Image (cartoon, helix red, strand yellow):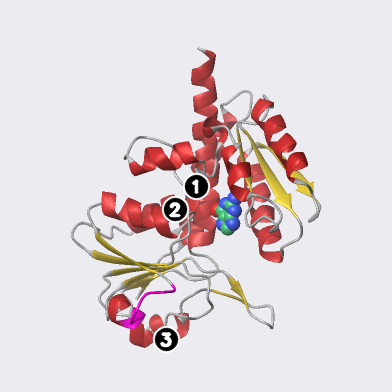
Amino acid sequence: MILLDGKELAKKIRTEIKEKVAKLDPKPGLAVVLVGNNPASEVYVGGKVKACDEVGFVSKKILFDETVEQADLMRAIDDLNQDKEIHGFIVQLPLPDHINEDLIIDGILPHKDADGFSPVNLGNMLMHKNTILPATPKGIIRLLEEYEIGLEGKHAVVVGRSNIVGKPIALLLQQKNATVTMCHSKTKDLKKVTKEADILICAAGKAHMITKDMVKRGAVVVDVGMNKLEDGMLVGDVDFEHVSKIASHITPVPGGVGPMTIAMLIENTIECYELAKGFKH
Ligand code: GUN
C-alpha cells in the first residue's frame, strides 16, 4: 500500500509559491471570512491563514458573530470586492442557517473567488474552460497526478454530491476520461457500487462509513472526510485501519486531502492576482 502524502506534496507546492511570491510586489492578498465558532471551520481557517503567512501573502481574517445579519455579511463581501490589497477571498462554509449561502457566494466577484465556488467559475469548469477551480477537487487531482495514477478508462466512484466536493470532483475525473459513478444518501446498495471502483473518492462526511468490505482489492482510495468523534479525535469517512490493508493507494486523515486544499487555495490566489494584473492593462 502506498500512502498518498498530501502533507508532503502541499509543502513542496507552498515552497515553490513562496519563491515566486518573494519576487512579487505588491504581495498577493487573501482574506478569509469566518462566521461563528464552528470548531472544524476554525481549524481550517487557522490553517489557511498560517499558510498565507508562510508563503508571504498579505492575509486578512474577518470574523463575525454567529448572529450576524445577511446585510452585514454582504457589506463585508462588497468591501473585499473593492479592496485593492486583497486579490482573492473566501467565505468559510457552512454558514449559520439564517444566512442565505447562495446569495453570499453570488456576491463574490468571480476573479476574486479563490475557492472557485461562484456560479461563473463553476459554469466555466463545467464547460472545461480555463478557470479558478474549487480547491479540494483540484487538490485531489493534483495528488493523483503526483503519484502517476492513471485515470483514463478507470471506473471512479464518488460518494457524496456536495457543490464543493462531490459534484466538481466527479466532473474533473470525467474530464480526465474516467468513467464516473456518483453515489449519495439515496443510492441503493452502496457497497455493490463502491466495490466496483478503481478509484474511490469518499466525501460524504460520515465517520468510518467506508469499510473494508466495500472496497475492491487494489483500489485507490481518497478520503475527503474530516469528522470529529465524541472523544475529539479527527477521522475520515474511510475505516483507514482496515481499508489500507487492501487498497493500492490511500490518503491518510489528517495529512491527505486537507493540506492539498490549502495549497490549492494559495495557488488559486496567485491566479486571482494574475487576473487582477490583467485587468489593469
Ligand atoms: N468548508 C469545508 N471546506 C471548505 C472549503 O474548501 N472552502 C470553504 N470556503 N469552506 C469550506
Ligand 1 image position (quadrant): bottom right
Q: Quadrant of residue 90?
A: top right
Between discs 3 and 1, the one toward the N terminus: 3
Q: Which residue is mark 2?
A: 139
Q: Is residue 132 visible to the viewer in this orientation of the structure? A: no
Report how far apart the C-alphas of labels 3 and 1 lie in the structure. Answer: 30 Å
Between discs 1 and 2, the one toward the N terminus: 2
Q: Position of residue 89 (x, y in %)?
A: 62, 39
Q: Position of residue 133 (x, y in %)?
A: 44, 43
Q: Which residue is mark 1?
A: 264
Q: Which residues are magenta?
A: 185-191
Q: How many marks?
A: 3
Q: Which residue is mark 3?
A: 242
Q: Tell me if residue 201 comes above or below residue 259 in the rendering.
A: below
* Contact flag, marks 1 and 2 (Cβ < 8 Å): yes
Q: Main secondary structure of the magenta part?
A: loop
